[in-house]
Image (tube, rainbow, N blue to C red):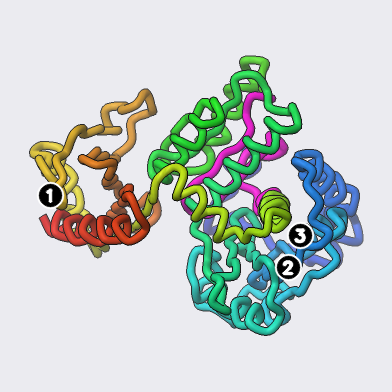
Amino acid sequence: MLSFIEKTDCFDGVRLTNFDEAVAVGTIQYIPDECLNAFIDAVLALRPGNDVSKLKLVYTPLNGSGLECVKMLLNKMDVKDLTVVPEQEKPDGNFPTCPFPNPEIREAMETGLRLCGKVHPDLMLGTDPDCDRMGAAVPDGLGGYRLITGNEMGVLLLDYLCRTRLERGTMPERPVAVTTIVSTDMASPVAEHYSVELRRTLTGFKYIGEQIGLLESEGHPERYIFGFEESYGYLSGAHVRDKDAVNAVMLACECAAWYAGQGMTLLDAINALYEKFGWYQNGLLSKAFEGQDGMEAMNRLMKSLRAIPPAAIADRKVLKTVDYLEGGMGLIPSDVLEFRLERGAKLIVRPSGTEPKLKVYLSVRGESEALAFQALEELKTAAEALMEG
């Protein structure tokens, strides 16, 4: 395939074909149902095994590709009460209901949230257009619905998988979970609680997939139990090498159903984990640098932070600076700076890989929800000043 691509001139070598004729002669073939069935069966083979038949769901594919896969999965899981958001059910590349069909963004989930106000589900799930990321909302106890962040869902699923596999005797020897350097620090004490090795990679799910490959090359693929990133990507098996929202839907449903059996919502569940492991809060700031002058300014700022790293941020002493450009933490060199602060706070700065902007990832830990949010706001203010140079 690569040899054909390399022979094609990007401007003059592209040829068009008649779709119907190509289908007729077999040059273009539809993916057979057997392929979809095999994929769903591969996902279901990873089920921890809790009953979800009493779960009431609202689901939106955000006008993308997830509908058939997710509906087939939920049907095989015996979910009986499913409402699909009608405005977002069918594929539509214009995405008429939201400016950006990204389950990380509240506006994308707003249509589904309005439907929740009428249907009152136990759980609302949304998958992005290519169905590799999943967002969720749960009852807030006040008559509305509260979105679960990517970090919160990652911790919920990690805890659920570890607990369930230990209870059922399916936890492998020397289990491994994987997340990224910009994902919540809360994953560390959760993994430690269950004696799970937690590996951190650079940003990008391909690096989590790489860890699966390494375990396979060592002859122990079973050691991998879960991977997640803060940007709503999750994976509990080696059936693919990327985040998989179908797999995530399965896990979220089982997790919600298990907690429902304890008389708890997923919001109750994450609050219980906060009480147990500490009130971790995370934030993300972005600073755009437009044009050539902007790129040069961004590069100068990164060089300045390397040459003269701050001694304190938000009145918290910088305890440790990790420069990933030098291969920090044993990872391949990457243009990322990490500042570890007093009292469990962290700030990571990295240029975006796709846009002319700097991304600043913030992490704090507080003794209560209020104190954690206060610390996060203080760190945001300090980070904004830091980005101004």
The amino acid type found where label 2 is placed reads Leu
Quadrant in the rendering for residue 311: top left
Q: Quadrant of the C terminus?
A: bottom left
- Read off the residue under disc 1: 315
**Tag 2 secondary structure:** strand
Relative to 43, 244 lies left or right: left
Q: Quadrant of the N terminus?
A: top right
Asked whether the residues under the numbered discs 3 and 2 touch, taking CB atoms below 8 Å apart as contact, a structural biologist would say: no
Give the residues drawn in magenta, as a range: 222-249
Give the foreground label among 3 and 2. Answer: 2
Residue 167 makes an appearance in the image:
yes
Q: Kindly report the distance in space between the C-alpha atoms of the residues bearing marks 3 and 2.
A: 12 Å
Relative to 311, 212 lies left or right: right
Q: Kindly report the distance in space between the C-alpha atoms of the residues bearing marks 3 and 1.
A: 47 Å
Residue 252 on image: x %, y %: 66, 54
Question: Does the stretch in magenta take in 73?
Answer: no
Residue 294 on image: x %, y %: 20, 60
**Tag 3 secondary structure:** helix
Asked whether the residues under the numbered discs 3 and 1 touch, taking CB atoms below 8 Å apart as contact, a structural biologist would say: no
Tag of residue 57:
2
Residue at point 57%, 27% (across, down) = 176
Camera-side residue: 215 or 34? 215
Residue at point 24%, 59% (across, down) = 380
- Read off the residue under disc 3: 70
Tag of residue 12:
none
Residue 249 makes an appearance in the image:
no
